[in-house]
């Protein structure tokens, strides 16, 4: 056999970057390249329409190897396994144990017990963990902060009683006072002295972590990716510094910290997020001079976001959470929770929980996401995103450190103020459809009814402002404003009917009718489209016969000067009159008394609220 290696496609000359840009400029026909094709992200950097190998020449991430410092390519070398986790709220230990044993037989290998304010005892723990092999599955526990030390004592006593190998116990014992401050506005710093004591108790359990960073709270409050990353790093560093200052060895301190992070809908950027944040955390821990690089590994439990979940068209939540789960899996997280699709409006059912489990099992068992380590490595786009996110998150981390650290920032309220401002902005962007929520503010299901569904109110409400020690996060799903609007419409004595008076240019009238139906259905109105009318009088008569409360004239900009005013005058106040578009003759139409216009620059939410008010809803 010849040892010669023939190079393929030598007859083709690779175009240069400038040649690509020249070709793009021709295709744009004079349009601005920066405005048309360069994406300015919410994270503070630009994304180009294409990347080449030369764009990565100054990056260090492509040189990294799986399982090696700084762990940008994951903590493992030979596989991409992750724990499939499901959380269980414990009200009765026997029932919780029964449920845990059931789901452990259905693909789950990680359980998260949420104990709340349960009355803890040795009997309680034995009942809860009966027949669960703690050396075979990951089990995590979350109780009231004040009971964390007691819970640790009871668990360790149970493990010793059962004779388990301490090195095989994998899981976590949740202790995160700062999360309580962010959620409830109550100062929990008095609990921080328990943190080093808790770490010392668990020092003989190398895979049992107890200091948690719940940045998923930020994600579910509307934080952008860079905000979650930068604040998670500062949050973790706050705990690490306090542990080291308390005399805890750096290796032990770092090995007891676990991160709980959210997953948003931005598929490629989320892959890059987990790669970048692992790299940055490794660099932070390295500054504490640990004896082993393994101490620099970032252990992440990822949960699909609740921020973008919707009450209406709720099965679309499955599409959102599936792509989110794929991002986290490809990025190499330690464990993952897929939030059931019905979480916004009810306690998840057995069906929705089964689907949520299966979403992970499909990508693991059928798509083999667990076989390949960091498949995104080497992608010009993903490597660029990894570097760009790392740079922006690092800036935010340094800003927090310069201002005294994460705890000081939380006490001052600057973290909460930043996240709350982002939440307000994102709600505003959803109102203007700058951010799309499929089935809610874009392409709603025209005929769907709530069928009694109401948004669930979180049982972890923030303390009343008058009683708060520090400001709290103000979390609300991005869809909540539209849902409130649509529920109000549905509860009205009569659901408004919006009739499309289509006339004139065929292409324009159809396009504007589709736009208007989509626009008005976001409020739950009954929309009636039409093929077209020969005269405005014919259209208005048909609208009134159909019982229309709103008549939307749909035509071309040029033809509105001819059709809009006669239609408005013939309607004569018998229904609300709306023009679909923003024609050049708008001022003339307003002078004739026409008030309502809908177009791509409209604030959909505010416009529909105004229409509801006019209709007496």
Image (cartoon, rainbow, N blue to C red):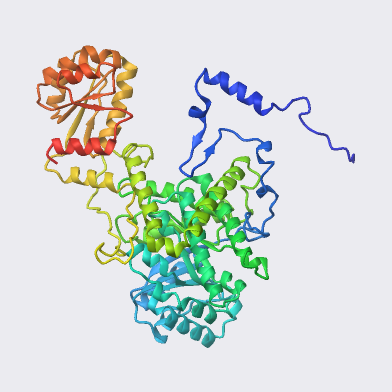
Asked whether 601 or 110 is in front, the reply is: 601
User: What residue lies at 28% left-to-right and 57% top-to-bottom?
Assistant: 456
In the picture, measured across the screen, residue 64 lies left or right of residue 254, that is right
Q: Is residue 443 above or below residue 262?
A: above
Q: Point out residue 89 in the picture as x, y percentages from the top left corner.
A: 37, 69
- Going by the picture, which residue comes out furthest to the bottom? 161
Q: Please identify the quarter of the rendering in which residue 136 is found.
A: bottom right
Residue 50 picture quarter:
top right
Q: Quadrant of the N terminus?
A: top right
Residue 450 vs 403, above or below: the answer is: above
User: Residue 314's x, y, as percent?
Assistant: 34, 48
* Camera sees residue 105: no
Closer-to-camera residue (310/70): 70
> So how many labels did they put on this image?
0
Q: Please state the horizontal and vertical placement of residue 553, each as a whole percent of the image.
A: 22, 22
From the viewer's perspective, is 396 left or right of 531?
A: right
């Amino acid at each position: 056999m010849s040892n010669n290696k023939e190079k393929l496609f030598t007859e083709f000359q690779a175009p240069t970057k400038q040649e690509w840009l020249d070709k793009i400029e021709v295709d744009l026909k004079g349009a601005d390249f920066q405005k048309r094709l360069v994406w300015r992200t919410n994270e503070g950097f630009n994304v180009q329409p294409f990347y080449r190998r030369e764009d990565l020449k100054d990056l260090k991430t492509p040189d990294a190897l799986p399982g090696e410092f700084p762990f940008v390519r994951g903590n493992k070398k030979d596989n991409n396994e992750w724990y499939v986790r499901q959380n269980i709220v414990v009200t009765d230990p026997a029932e919780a144990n029964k449920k845990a044993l059931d789901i452990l037989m259905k693909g789950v290998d990680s359980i998260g017990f949420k104990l709340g304010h349960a009355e803890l005892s040795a009997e309680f723990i034995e009942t809860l963990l009966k027949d669960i092999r703690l050396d075979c599955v990951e089990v995590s526990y979350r109780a009231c902060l004040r009971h964390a030390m007691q819970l640790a004592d009871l668990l360790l006593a149970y493990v010793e009683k059962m004779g388990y190998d301490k090195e095989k116990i994998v899981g976590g014992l949740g202790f995160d006072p700062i999360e309580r401050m962010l959620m409830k506005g109550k100062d929990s710093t008095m609990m921080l002295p328990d943190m080093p004591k808790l770490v010392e108790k668990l020092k003989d359990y190398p895979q049992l972590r107890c200091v948690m960073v719940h940045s998923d709270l930020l994600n579910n409050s509307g934080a952008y990716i860079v905000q979650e990353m930068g604040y998670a790093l500062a949050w973790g560093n706050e705990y690490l510094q306090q542990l080291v200052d308390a005399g805890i060895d750096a290796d032990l301190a770092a090995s007891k910290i676990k991160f709980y992070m959210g997953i948003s809908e931005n598929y490629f950027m989320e892959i890059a997020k987990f790669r970048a944040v692992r790299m940055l955390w490794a660099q932070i821990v390295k500054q504490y001079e640990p004896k082993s690089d393994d101490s620099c590994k970032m252990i992440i439990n990822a949960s699909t976001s609740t921020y973008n979940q919707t009450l209406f068209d709720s099965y679309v939540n499955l599409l959102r959470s599936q792509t989110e789960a794929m991002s986290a899996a490809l990025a190499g997280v330690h464990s993952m929770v897929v939030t059931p699709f019905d979480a916004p409006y009810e306690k998840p059912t057995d069906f929705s929980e089964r689907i949520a489990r299966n979403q992970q099992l499909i990508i693991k068992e059928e798509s083999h996401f667990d076989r390949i380590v960091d498949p995104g490595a080497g992608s010009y786009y993903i490597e660029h995103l990894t570097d760009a996110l790392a740079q922006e998150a690092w800036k935010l981390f340094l800003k927090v450190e310069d201002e005294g650290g994460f705890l000081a920032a939380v006490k001052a309220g600057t973290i909460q103020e930043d996240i709350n401002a982002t939440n307000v902005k994102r709600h505003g962007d959803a109102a203007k459809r700058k951010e799309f929520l499929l089935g809610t503010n874009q392409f709603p299901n025209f005929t769907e009814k709530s069928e009694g569904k109401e948004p669930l109110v979180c049982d972890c409400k923030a303390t009343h402002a008058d009683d708060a020690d520090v400001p709290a996060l103000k979390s609300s799903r991005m869809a909540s404003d539209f849902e409130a609007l649509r529920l109000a419409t549905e509860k009205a004595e009569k659901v408004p009917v919006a009739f499309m008076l289509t006339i004139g240019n065929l292409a324009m009238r159809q396009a504007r009718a589709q736009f208007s139906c989509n626009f008005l259905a976001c409020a739950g109105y009954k929309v009636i489209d039409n093929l077209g009318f020969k005269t405005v009088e014919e259209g208005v008569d048909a609208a009134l016969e159909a019982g229309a409360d709103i008549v939307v004239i749909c035509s071309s900009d040029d033809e509105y000067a001819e059709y809009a005013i006669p239609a408005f005058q013939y309607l004569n106040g018998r229904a609300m009159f709306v023009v679909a578009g923003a024609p050049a003759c708008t001022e003339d139409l307003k002078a004739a008394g026409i008030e309502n216009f809908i177009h791509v620059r409209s604030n959909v939410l505010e416009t529909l609220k105004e229409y509801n008010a006019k209709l007496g809803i």
